[in-house]
Image (cartoon, rainbow, N blue to C red):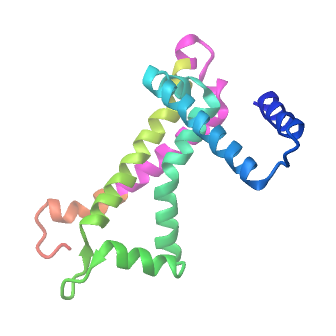
Amino acid sequence: MEQTFNDLCNERKQQAKQISLGFLLWMFIETFAGVIGEHLIEIERGATMENTISNDKSAAIVGILLAMPLAILLLIEISGVEPLHGFLVTLTTEAAGNNPGLNTFGKILMLGVLLLLPLGFIITLVPVVRNARVGHGFTANPVNLLIAVGLFIFIATLVTTFVIDQYPCWIGVPNCD
């Protein structure tokens, strides 16, 4: 890419044309389109996800990135950071008398974010399990193992909290909400 850029710049200089902002913008757009095209070819071949999970570092990064939306939403909710908290509340809730609840968008958002957690856990855990099966042990990928354990603890805490909160309703206690 660098050689191609140098060749195009030298060609413009030989034609006695200046390297303008328009030329640089055109080069940027053409390069960006080429990168997108190359990625689309990789996606069509179907090797993208296989390469992502097989690389230990990218699996750890993908696992963290999938867990970040829930972490950010929880951080905003717990800390009450304004104006983000107020915007999130107005975006996801609807007032229905004295008992405000999540609107449809809020339910879809929370469900989608909650489903990203186990996906991030699985993607992060794949290299650890693969190395353990080969015989390298669980500590061959300490970053992946640490992230997987952290995500597991986080998921277990969420499930436990939900069960403790909803258990009275499941056993039939009146007015459990």
Query: Predominant secondary structure in magenta?
Result: helix
Q: Does residue 156 appear left or right of residue 63 in this picture?
A: left
| Residue 29 in the image: above or below residue 122 | below
Look at 85% across and 49% down and name the residue there.
18
Quarter assignment of residue 95:
bottom left
* 24 is higher (above) or lower (below) than 15: below
Q: How many marks?
A: 0
Q: Quadrant of the N terminus?
A: top right
Q: Quadrant of the C terminus?
A: bottom left
Furthest-front residue in this view: 15
Give 174 or 101, whichever is nearer the viewer.
101
Q: Is residue 174 part of the magenta span, yes or no?
A: no
The stretch of residues the image draws in magenta is 131-160
Residue that appears at 84% across and 46% down: 17
User: Residue lying furthest bottom in this view?
Assistant: 98
- Residue farthest to the top? 134
Residue at point 55%, 23% (across, down)? 51
Say which residue appears at 24% left-offset and 62% top-offset: 166
Front residue (pair 15, 103): 15
Q: Is residue 158 left or right of residue 174?
A: right
Whether residue 41 is situated above or below residue 94 in the rendered picture: above
For the residue pair 121 and 15, the one nearer the viewer reads as: 15
Seen in the picture, residue 99 relative to 24 is either above or below; the reply is below
In the picture, residue 118 is in which quadrant? top left
Occupied quadrant, residue 135: top right
- Image coordinates for residue 124, horizontal then vertical, percent: 53, 35
| Residue 70 location (% of width, % of height) | 46, 57
How far across and down, in percent of the image, does residue 163 sit? 29, 57
